[in-house]
Image (cartoon, rainbow, N blue to C red):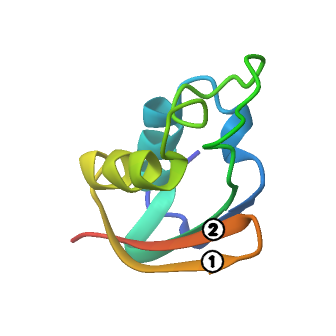
Amino acid sequence: MARHTFDAVVAVHSFQFWPDPYQSLAEIHRVLKPQGKLVLILRDHSRNAPDWLANPISRSEDEAEGALAALRLSGFEAWWVGRTGSSRCLVARKEG
């Protein structure tokens, strides 16, 4: 797939199944156009994360903070974080 193809990527309640979130975020970063947006909806597992979750960030004590750190390390600028019930919404923009 070509680089810089998409304006936006949305992932709803799937982050916990990404076995290598850094690799997944790198791929999303690669296919987004400059200033492209990523919307990441997390189901908060921080308190009672089951052992079978593939994503190590989802099994951590603070999934949202871990996801924000991973976004920044992957070249994204997180510019909005919201909460609705047990879900967190992170919106990030590709820098550049």
- Residue 49: x and y in percent read 70, 32
* Kind of residue at disc 1: Arg
Disc 1: which residue: 83
Residue 42: which disc?
A: none
- Residue 57: x and y in percent read 51, 34
Q: In which quarter of the view is residue 5 placed?
A: bottom right
**As rendered, which of 44 and 25 lies closer to the eye?**
44
Q: Quick check: 30 left or right of 2?
A: left
- Residue 29: x and y in percent read 42, 53
* Kind of residue at disc 2: Arg
Name the residue located 42 percent from the left edge and 50 percent from the top edge: 30
Disc 2: which residue: 88
Tell me the crowding category of disc 2: few under 14, some 14 to 19, or many 20 or more residues within 10 angstroms, Cα based: some
**As rendered, which of 71 and 44 lies closer to the eye?**
44
Q: Give the quadrant of the N terminus.
A: top right
Q: Does residue 50 lie above or below 30 as drawn? A: above
Instruction: Kindly give the residue lying farthest to the top in the view shown.
Output: 51
Name the residue located 69 percent from the left edge and 22 percent from the top edge: 54
Please report contact status of discs 1 and 2: CB closer than 8 Å, yes or no.
Answer: yes
- Residue 47: x and y in percent read 65, 42
Give the Cα separation between the discs numbered 1 and 2: 4 Å
Q: Does residue 6 lie above or below 68 as drawn? A: below
